[in-house]
Amino acid sequence: MRDYLFDTNCILRFLLRDNLPQASIIKQYFQNAKDGKVKIHIPILAFVEAVFILTRLYHFQKADVIEKLTTLAELTYIEIEKRSLLISALSIYGKANISIVDSIFMVEARQTGKELLTFDKRLKQLKITE
């Protein structure tokens, strides 16, 4: 079985469908993964970059980005790096006025039992429950 590592462009073409030939190819890879014919891995960095591109370049609403990326991250037939961390971070990102990166830092610290060391006063004071 072939293993594929998807980059941010794969996520964007699938979600945006702005390049139909490429979107169709990605859709077929997802279907093949669902059918157990291939494995797809998506690193957490691809999701982070997708958040920035969708919100800053394409001007998507934060809530729409969170919904789309969370739905993608929850697909069980796709291997997502640090899936639970990512889904939790997307949730926090939706509730607080912080970046997706800061959300990941918060969740990583909480999930690993570490204290987040930061000089960002706003982030230090932020208490979020999922």
Image (tube, rainbow, N blue to C red):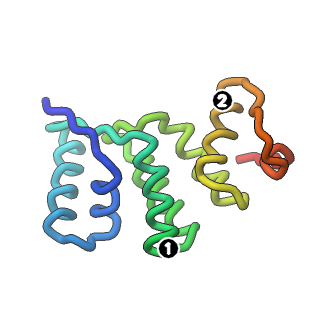
* Residue 77 drawn above or below residue 109: below
Single out the residue that lies furthest toward the top. 113
Q: In the displayed structure, does residue 71 sit left or right of residue 120? A: left
Q: In the displayed structure, does residue 25 sit left or right of residue 103? A: left
Q: Which mark is residue 60?
A: 1
Percent x, y for residue 63?
57, 67
CB under 8 Å between discs 1 and 2: no
Q: Which residue shows up at 77% across the image and 38% down it?
A: 118
Percent x, y for residue 17?
27, 70
Q: Which residue shows up at 55% across the image and 73% down it?
A: 61
* Residue 23 drawn above or below residue 81: below
In this figure, which residue is indicated by the disc labeled 2? 111
Disc 2 crowd rating (10 Å Cα; few below 14, some 14-19, many 20+) is few
Q: In the displayed structure, does residue 113 sit left or right of residue 80? A: right
Q: In the displayed structure, does residue 83 sit left or right of residue 120? A: left
Q: Which mark is residue 89?
A: none
